[in-house]
Image: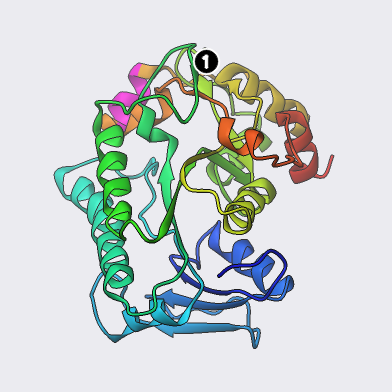
Amino acid sequence: MITVGGEMKVLLIGATGFVGKPLVRALYQRGDSCTVISRSGRDPWRQPQVDVVTVDPAKPGPWTDHVGRCDAVVNLAGERIIDPARRWTAERKKLLRSSRIEITRIVARAIKDSRNPPAVLLNASAIGYYGPHGDAIIDEDTGPGKDFLGELCVEWEAAAKEAGDSVRVGLLRTGMVLGKGGGVLGPLLPLFKTGLGGPWGDGKQWWSWIHIADEVGLILFALDRRLSGPLNLTAPEPVTVNEFAEALGSGLRRPSLFRAPATVLKLAMGESAAALLASQRVVPKQALAAGYCFRFRSLYQALDDLLGS
């Protein structure tokens, strides 16, 4: 049984990435212990409360025995969806699917087969689940899209649900994460700092973002408050791409006039450009209803914190 404020044993997969590193830090700082399953074996924390197990989570093996020794499992595994340098070739799509669906199935099967299963599985997902919706407001009750990302997320979440009826399953539908040293800002900051940044597409498409502090905060909130089902990890105030570019340029005190037309993005990125051009006005209905208090509700608040202005 997980108790709020009590020590929790958490098993994490895919935790050496942009979101996982601060999540593990937040867990051990509040007194929880963590076992991190990592292909690379990197240990950026070097804390006695964090045990890093070097193994490939895409392959079933003795490492799955750890699910029976923990209170909660958090699965963040998955290759980056948006990578401007990589088109969605058939091989790339296969990797995007296997790094999510297959690993999630292995985790879910291990939980289901365990004699002493954890109380909860929080499994990564994405707002790509919903597909493009124009100006319509999207919440957790909105159905899935019919595009590649929508279908991928449907299978991804279905794999997590295979953990069984006796285990609480939370589906973390994450938006564009803003933070220092990576995430959405990683590739954008160099362009905007040199004055070469700006909107993309027509700029009218909605972008649903979240500050890394609230991303971590909501995952902890979901663990402690026993939330289940889909949970949108996005800030309450989504913005258009035009507004995002203007706010980022203003925060850096640089112009944001260079627009990347949709045709150019499609030529450069192929089908993957759809992830940048889709309009998704997502709101965190479940988080707000459960009482989560966002640290960064507005984009200007978030950028002021991250850019140090």
- Asked where in the image residue 114 lies, by quadrant, the reply is bottom left
Nearest to the observer: residue 296 or residue 159: 159
Nearest to the observer: residue 257 or residue 49: 49
Q: Please give the name of the residue rendered at 68% of the width and 37% of the height, measured from the top-left corner.
A: 193
Inspect the magenta stretch and tell me whether residue 186 lies in it. no
Whether residue 8 is visible to the viewer of this picture, yes or no, is yes
Q: Is residue 288 left or right of residue 110?
A: right
Q: Position of residue 62 (x, y in %)?
A: 29, 86
Q: Position of residue 216 (x, y in %)?
A: 63, 54
- Tell me the amino acid under the disc marked 1: Gly
State whether the magenta stretch is mostly helix, strand or loop: helix
Q: Position of residue 44 (x, y in %)?
A: 59, 76
Q: Position of residue 35 (x, y in %)?
A: 50, 79
Q: Which residues are magenta?
A: 263-269
Nearest to the observer: residue 97 or residue 105: 105
Q: Please give the name of the residue rendered at 31% of the width and 44% of the height, measured from the top-left corner.
A: 86
Most distant residue in the left direction: 90
Q: Quadrant of the C terminus?
A: top right
Residue named by callout 1: 203
Q: Please give the name of the residue rendered at 41% of the width and 46% of the height, measured from the top-left corner.
A: 125
Could you classify mark 1 by the number of other residues whose Cα lies within 10 Å: few (under 14), some (14-19), or many (20 or more)? many
Up-down relation of residue 149 to residue 67 (above or below): above
